[in-house]
Image (spheres, coloured by chain):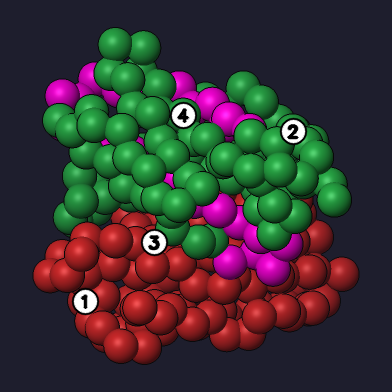
Chain colours: A green, B red
Amino acid sequence: AQKVTQAQTEISVVEKEDVTLDCVYETRDTTYYLFWYKQPPSGELVFLIRRNSFDEQNEISGRYSWNFQKSTSSFNFTITASQVVDSAVYFCALSRKLTGANSKLTFGKGITLSVRP
Amino acid sequence: GAVVSQHPSRVICKSGTSVKIECRSLDFQATTMFWYRQFPKQSLMLMATSNEGSKATYEQGVEKDKFLINHASLTLSTLTVTSAHPEDSSFYICSAKTDFRTYEQYFGPGTRLTVT
């Protein structure tokens, strides 16, 4: 069975602070895929990143960066110099495959990030 | 980027009636569509997986006769909530994916169902 744990439920920061959102996953598969999604108040999920289990290279995209560590089964997400527009619920998710029915996503419970001006 | 639409975006219905929610992939053919349900301030829970032309596969605990899913074409899947009750009130989100592009799941904007 697959499981995604996002232990933090709500985080509040002041604008320009850095913030890290934690994600820990469980899977018995050797090949799997990890995702982060953003859900703003409008409700529509926004894809942020996908990571393959065989690629532990960290990634940076603008103010966003991701730290994938298989040794600790973690896939953490850091926002640098946070902005009010970053306020949203962030979900970490896991899938077994990229195609077919096993591409279904197992989501964590989400982290509500509030960035205050 | 790829676009997935859902209709309606909001619906209010009376207890005992049925409601149909449509999910369309607008610019690609979706080999697989997923239906998720999200309660307020909670995570997304997968309800079922549907492939065009075949029966949907429901997750454990999801009532097949209550949540009817039809994937009639490669661009359209429908979820019908039959004999709705207040506890069915939720945010329903579909996603569509193709195995021939970037392998991403493209999510619809969601449908807010309120059963009175």
Q: Are marks 4 and 2 in contact (CB under 8 Å)?
A: no
Where disc 3 sits, the SS reads: strand
Question: Going 73% across and 80% down the picture, which residue do you hit?
Answer: B11
Q: Residue furthest top?
A: A71
Q: CA distance from mark 3 to mark 4?
A: 26 Å
User: Residue, x 80% and y 60% (percent of image)?
Assistant: B86
Residue A70 versus residue B64 in the image, above or below:
above
Where does label 4 land, which residue? A76
Q: Amino acid at mark 1?
A: Gly
Q: Please identify the quadrant where the N terminus of chain A is shown.
A: top left
Residue A65, numbered label: none
Q: Is residue A72 above or below residue A36?
A: above
Q: CA distance from mark 4 to mark 1?
A: 39 Å
- Residue B74 against residue A72 in the figure, above or below: below
Q: How much space separates mark 4 and mark 2, taking CA atoms?
A: 14 Å
Q: Residues within 10 Å of mark 1 (few under 14, many from 20)?
A: few
Between label 3 and label 4, give the one nearer the viewer. 4
Residue at which label 1 appears: B53
Identify the residue under disc 2.
A11
- Circles 2 and 3 on the same chain: no
Label 2: chain letter: A
Q: Residues within 10 Å of mark 2 (few under 14, many from 20)?
A: some
- Range of residues picked out in magenta: A19-44
Characterize the local packing of mark 4: few (<14), some (14-19) or many (20 or more) Cα atoms within 10 angstroms: some
**Callout 2, which amino acid?**
Ile
Q: Amino acid at mark 3?
A: Phe
